[in-house]
Image (spheres, rainbow, N blue to C red):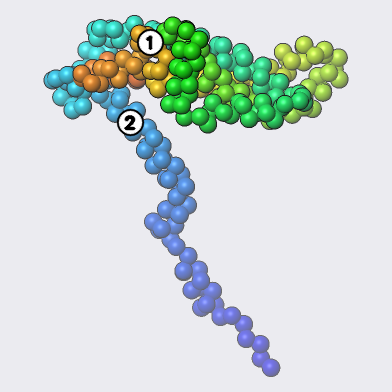
Amino acid sequence: MAVTTPSSDSSSMSVRRRPRGPVRWLRSRLIPLVGLLVLLYMFAPIFVVVLFSFNQPSGRFNYQWVHFSTNAWTNLCQVGGMCEALRLSLLIGVVATLCSVLLGTLVAFAIGRHRFRGRSGANLMVFMPMATPEVVMGSSLLALFVGMNVARGTGTVLVAHIMFCLSFVVVTVKARIASLDPRLEQAAMDLYANERTTFWKVTFPLVLPGIVGASLLAFSLSFDDFIVTNFNSGSTVTFPMFVWGAAQRGTPPQVNVVGSLMFVLSLAVVIATQVVRRRRSRV
C-alpha cells in the first residue's frame, strides 16, 4: 500500500496563514501599548496641572487656557494664606511621617519576626484603618476629641494623620521583611557578628528600601488628606483645605504650581533612589 505524505502545498499554506505586517507587529507589542495607554490615562491629570500652572487666566477661575505666563511661578505667595497653609501641611506631613515610620517599623518587625499571643489580632487591627472609610474615621476621631474635651487644631490633625499613616507603614515594611532571606543573617552570625552588628550591617540595609517607600507613601497620604483633616482641624487650615475653599471663589494658578512642584520632587526622590540602588547592585 502506498503511504501518503503531506504535500508541500499544505505546509506552505499553513505558513502563509501566519499573520504578517501590521497585525503581527500589533500582536507582538500589544501588552507594551496597553501599558503605555494606561500610563497616559493616569498621568493625563498631572499633565493638565503642569500645563495650567503656566496659564494667565483672565478671571478668577483657571479652567480655560488664555496665554502662556510664568507669573504664578515667580509670585508663588501672592495668594493670601496659601504659603502659610502649605508650610503647615509640610510640617504636619514631615512630623507624621517620622512618627508613623518609627512606630510602624517597630510594629512591622514585631509582627513579622516574632510569634506572640494575639499576633493574628494585631494583624487584623493594622488593616482596620486602611479598610475604614475616611468619613467614618474622621467623624469617630471628632467624637473622641470632643468627648475628651480636646481642642481641635494642629495637634489633633497630627494625631489623626499618624494614626492612618501607621497602617500603611506597617504593611509596606512588613512585606519587605517577609521577603528577606534569613540565610543572610545566619551567614553574618556565622562570621562572628553579634545581633546588633547583624541588624545594622545586614538587616537594616535590606529593609531600608521598604522604609523609604513607606515614608514616601505616608508623606503623600498626610499631605493631601482632606476628609479626616476637615473633621479635626478646627480653625487650622492646611493646603488641601485652602484649595477646597479657594475653589469656591476661584482657583489661582499658584495651586497648580504647588501641585507641579510636589510631583517633580516626588519623581526626583524616586529616580534618586533607583540610581543609588543600581549603583549599589553594581558594586
Left or right, 203 with respect to 130, comes to right
- Of residues 257 and 139, the one nearer the viewer is 139
The earlier-in-sequence mark between 1 and 2 is 2
Q: Helix, strand or loop at disc 1?
A: loop
Residue 89 percent location from the top left of the image = 41, 11
Left or right, 52 with respect to 112, comes to left
Whether tag 1 and tag 2 are in contact, CB under 8 A, the answer is no
> For the residue marked with disc 1, what is the amino acid?
Gly
Q: Quadrant of residue 101?
A: top right
> In the image, which disc is placed on residue 45?
2
> In the image, which disc is placed on residue 94?
none
* Residue carrying label 1: 234
Residue 270 percent location from the top left of the image = 50, 22
Residue at 53% of width from left, 28% of height from top?
130
Q: Quadrant of residue 250?
A: top left
**Residue 74 seen in render:** no
Viewer-nearest of discs 1 and 2: 1
Left or right, 206 with respect to 223, comes to right
Residue 221 percent location from the top left of the image = 46, 21
> Badge 1, how many Cα within 10 Å: few under 14, some, many 20+?
some
**Residue 71 seen in render:** yes
- Of residues 172 and 189, the one nearer the viewer is 172
Residue at 79% of width from left, 27% of height from top?
183
Q: Can you say which quadrant of the picture contains the N terminus?
A: bottom right
Alpha-carbon span between mark 1 and mark 2 = 31 Å
Residue at 29% of width from left, 7% of height from top?
81
